[in-house]
Image (tube, grey):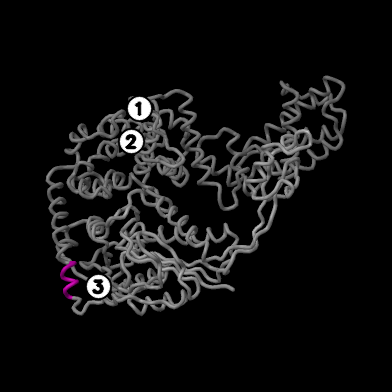
Amino acid sequence: MKHALLIEIGCEDLPARYVLPLAEALRSGMAGGLDRRGIAHGEAKLYATPRRIAVQIAEVAATQPEQSIERSGPALAAAYKDGQPTPAALGFARSCGVDFAALGQKDGKLHFARTEPGKPTAELMPAIFEESLKGMDELVPKRMRWGNGEETFVRPVLWLLALLGDAVVPLNRFGLSSGRLSYGHRFHAPAAISLQSPEDYEVALKAAHVWAEVGSRKADIRRQIEVTATELGGHARITEDLLDEVTALVEWPVVIAGRMESRFTDELPPEVIVATVETNQRYFTVFEDAGLTKLKPLFITIANIVSKDPSQIISGNERVVRPRLTDALFFWEQDKKQPLAAYGTKLETATYQKELGSVAVRVARIGSLATAVAEELGADVAAVGRAAALCKNDLVTKMVFEFPELQGLMGGYYARASGESDAVATAIREHYLPVQQGTSIPSTSVGQVLSLTDKLDALAGIFAIGQKPTASKDPYALRRAANGVLRICIEGGLKLDLADLLRQALDLQPAGKKDAALHGELLEFVLERLRALLVSGGVSTEMFEAVKATGVSQPLDFAERLNALQGFAALPASANLAAAHKRVRNLLKQAGTVSEQIDSALFEQPAERALFTAINSLQLGGDYASQLDALAGLRDPVDDFFAAVMVNADNPAVRANRLALLARLDKLCRSVADISLLPG
């Protein structure tokens, strides 16, 4: 027989960031526990609200299948002495619960095998539940104790529900015994709900004003927000992070709209209002246009209750927002009382990193590197230098102290208010871009240079003091910085050499190791990020390695070669040429030093002359795709050569001449990428 399984842990309100991860851990823990014990089951569905995490698993078998138990014992040489079982052999038999005569032999060892009936699923549930709780505990570094108990959880556990079909699964945890009771909304339906079967769960809770299914609850919150924004004549700004957080904060979502004083939207930059309203209050802002450029003096929030007097909730939310925006307006006005440049002196007392000096010292490094890069690219050196000098000044303003997430953005606003040029202000505003995958790079050449050098300095400095990322930790976000450097070079079309840039950035660091070994390690770190960036969409690891083998360290050039190689790899000739090139590389490796001089008079076979002629007539001009297309034309003469010619001829001169011809071919096959590294 098969029954549905339902496990629910009811508790005090959970922190929003843990709601979904804990539910996922419970689902994977319970389903995985059944799998490890061979218990068949259907779909495992999670439920999660601030007051509960639950999993419902369909069609769970009532018992385990028959279990096969096998154990290997001592080697036969150690199991017998003078034809009698040794103490080790007898001990193995006792550990298996059988007489020695019942043991068999397998692979030169004593062997024990038996089958036994599977256990009832309900009997195995306590152990599976404990395993699941351990996985959940690993997600939360700090857990709570409550009452007189010693058990811990994220928040105090209030009830424990466990059903397999219509029967209660006996679980004892958190000082509670499991039952069939759940509870509805704290205010709308606080009475206990007795469930007869797991299938009743979702419907029964919804009747008690608890929307337990996360995906549909999130979708309905989005729908309610969008409908309300439309009714208000605007467009809501809905980010996935905020939507996820709000979804985890409510059991019965009800949209409420409020107002803020128009002086805030008239005088404050929109990003400041968004940071205040969204980050601090978890409200959604409303814009006049779909492009989200002009704010309306409105906000939308999600209540967790159907109020008889919504105006009270609205006025309460408005009272909370008003002083926060008043503070923000005060910071804005105070910060503008002096030009952005005046804040630079405060950077001398602001520490960037104790071994790498103050923020002012870091700004000087960025400026030096940025100027050099601007000169190389032919960018506006004066604008780059000015933007670099001012790019961190907003860190010591009142606004950024209160809202650190606005660094850069506020620098751009203050630069414009101080009379700086648009080029300088825009570069400062955008120099932290791209902040994550999917966000754009800086829109101007000045901003691209500034962002690039800011990230290069961070990479070089942190590597120099030995704080490079580990597999699990990256406190300085160096992987993100490396991705930013690469994306700016590639998407910005900047012909810059990564090895040279990193060398310059290392040389400017005031402390730490800056030798060739560290430079190579840092370059390899960034190239590995390039691999993650480019190896997708049909680009294989072999293709990446083929380009990397050429030693190219210009990200733009690397991407162009890889793009061309992707097209070449799709040609029928590519596999043949790759196989032939592998053979060429092996022959040259075995030969050692090979001359590059080819004497056509030493050709003995027509196939030698045909390959020589094909190589000499090869036109490798144009882009990389054209060059690889030209190489594909060598397929037939190369195949004919290996079919007709013995490279290691007895005559030393003929042998050396043939190897020189292959060396010329090898050089061509590594002109864009190492063709021998492709499948073939």
Give the magenta-colored segment's residue range.
Answer: 311-317
Q: Secondary structure at mark 3?
A: strand
Disc 1 to disc 2, C-alpha distance: 22 Å
Tell me the quarter of the image containing the C terminus: top right
Label of residue 281 in the image = none
Label of residue 256 in the image = 3
Identify the amino acid type marked 1.
Gln
Residue 316 lies in magenta, yes or no?
yes
Tell me the quarter of the image containing the N terminus: bottom right
Relative to residue 54, is residue 679 depicted above or below? Answer: above
- Does residue 291 appear anywhere in the picture? no
Identify the amino acid type marked 3.
Ile
Q: Nearer the viewer, mark 2 or mark 3?
A: 3
Q: Mark 2 or mark 1, which is nearer the start of the sequence?
A: 2
Identify the amino acid type marked 2.
Val
Q: Nearer the viewer, mark 3 or mark 1?
A: 3
